[in-house]
Image (tube, grey):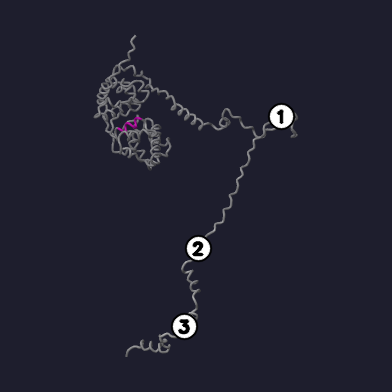
Amino acid sequence: MSTRKPAQPNRQLLVAKMHKALKTLYKPVVPNTSRPMLEQVLFACCLENAPYDVAEKALARLLKGYFDLNEVRVTTVVELAETLHDLPDPARAALALRRVLQSVFESSYAFTLENAKKHSIAHGIKTLEHLHGATPFVVHFVASTTLGGNFVPLDQGALAGLYLAGIISQEEYDAGKVAGFERFVPKKGSVEFSSLLHQFGVEVLGNLHGATVKKVLQAVNPAAKDRFPKRGEPLPAPNPPPPPAGKQAQKAADAARSAAEEHRPAGPQAAARPAGKTPLPPPGSGPKRAADGKPIPGSKPGPKPFVVKPLTIKPPAEPAPVVKPEPRKSKADKQPEKKAARPEPADRKKANKAAKKPKAAKAGSARPPSKPADVKRHSTQLVRQKPR
C-alpha cells in the first residue's frame, strides 16, 4: 500500500484568488500611521476581531474619557469594558489594554514606546513581544503599520476564513499562527490584503452562514466545502496544542499550584498541615480528670498542652551622654582678655620714663653726655614754632 501524504494546496495561488474575491466585496482601509507607537498598540488591542470604524471610536472614547494613560492602567477591567461596550468582546480588549499599559509602565516608568522605533525592525518586534497582553495580531499589526515591516496580522476571524478556504491546515488553525504566511503575499499589496482579510474575518465571526462568506469561499476553493459547518452549527473552535513537556510544563504546574493555594478558602481545610508532619497537640490536653478535679487512677497522661509564651521585648539601652566640645572663642570674646593683660596707663608711663633715662657714662668713654631735658624741650619748641 502506498503511504503518500496528501498534496499540499498551492497557497500562493489560493491567496491570489482570495485577494481578488475580497477586492470586489470590500474596500481597503489605509491604517493611520501617525499615532505614537503606544497608541497604535492600544488601537490594535481594540481592533482584534472588530471592525475598523468601531475600533477607532472605542479608542477615541477611551482617550477622551480618562485623564491620562495612568488612569486607564489603574482602572478595573469592568469599568474599561463599559467604556469599550461597542466592541465584539469588550472584556478581552479591556484586559489586553490594562496588561499592556502595566507592562510598559513597569519596564520604563513612562507611557511611551518610541525607543523601539530607533533601532531595527527585529528589535522593535522583540520589544512588542515582551509586552504582557500583546497577542501575535497586535505585534504584527504594529510591525506592519508603525515599523514598516512586511507582515499580515491574523486574528481569530482571519484564521477561520483561511481555514475554511483550505489555505491553512488544521494544525495551524489550532496553533493560532501561520509561519511565513507573508511570503505568499506580494509586499506592495500586503497592507491592502491585510485590511481586506480582516474585514472578511469580522464577517466570518459575525455572520458565518451569510451570502458574503459563501460567495468568497466558493470563488477561492470550492473543494473545501467539507470544512464549512452545516447550517445552524457554529464555527469549529481551535483545539489548542498540549502543554510542552519538561521544565516549562513543571513551571506551568507550579504556577497553577501556587495560584490554587492563594485562592484556598479559609477554614479547617486551609489550616490543615502538609502530609508527613505531626499535627500540634490541642491546647489543654493532659491527664484525664474527674468532675471534682482529681485525676482518674490508671489513666495515661496526654501530651503536654501547647502554650504560647508571651513575647518579651527588652527596653532599649540608654544612649551614652554626648560630650559637646567647647565652642571656640571669637575675637570679640578674646579682646577683653587682651585688654586685661595690658598694664595700666600710670604703670605704662613709669616704664617709658625708666626706659628714657640716660645711662651713666662709663669711665674713659670719649662720647659726651646727652643734652639735658630742658634744652631738648626748648629746641623742640623752637622748631615747632610757626614762622611770622
Q: Nearer the viewer, mark 2 or mark 3?
A: 3
Badge 1 vs badge 3, beta-carbon distance below 8 Å:
no
Please tell me whether residue 137 belongs to the stretch shown in magenta. yes
Residue at (33% x, 33% y) in the render: 125
Disc 3 marks a residue whose amino acid type is: Lys
Please tell me whether residue 357 belongs to the stretch shown in magenta. no
Q: Would you name the residue on which mark 1 appears?
A: 300
CA distance for labels 2 and 1:
78 Å
Residue at (49% x, 77% y) in the render: 343
CA distance for labels 2 and 3:
42 Å
Q: Residues within 10 Å of mark 1 (few under 14, many from 20)?
A: few
Residue at (55% x, 33% y) in the render: 266
Residue extending furthest bottom? 388
Q: Would you name the residue on which mark 3 appears?
A: 353
Query: Residue 121, can we see it?
Result: yes
Disc 1 marks a residue whose amino acid type is: Lys
Query: Residue 206, can we see it?
Result: no
Q: Residues within 10 Å of mark 2 (few under 14, many from 20)?
A: few
Q: Tell me if 282 is positioned left or right of 13 in this view.
A: right
Residue 153 drawn at (x, y percent) = 32, 29
Residue 109 drawn at (x, y percent) = 39, 42
Question: Which structural element holds mark 1?
Answer: loop
Badge 2 vs badge 1, beta-carbon distance below 8 Å:
no
Q: Would you name the residue on which mark 2 appears?
A: 327
Of the numbered discs 2 and 1, the one sitting upstream in the chain is: 1
Placement of 350 over or under 148, stated as above or below? below
Q: Residues within 10 Å of mark 3 (few under 14, many from 20)?
A: few
On the image, which quarter does residue 220 sit in? top left
Region in magenta? 136-143
Q: Nearer the viewer, mark 2 or mark 1?
A: 2
Placement of 177 over or under 112, stated as above or below? above
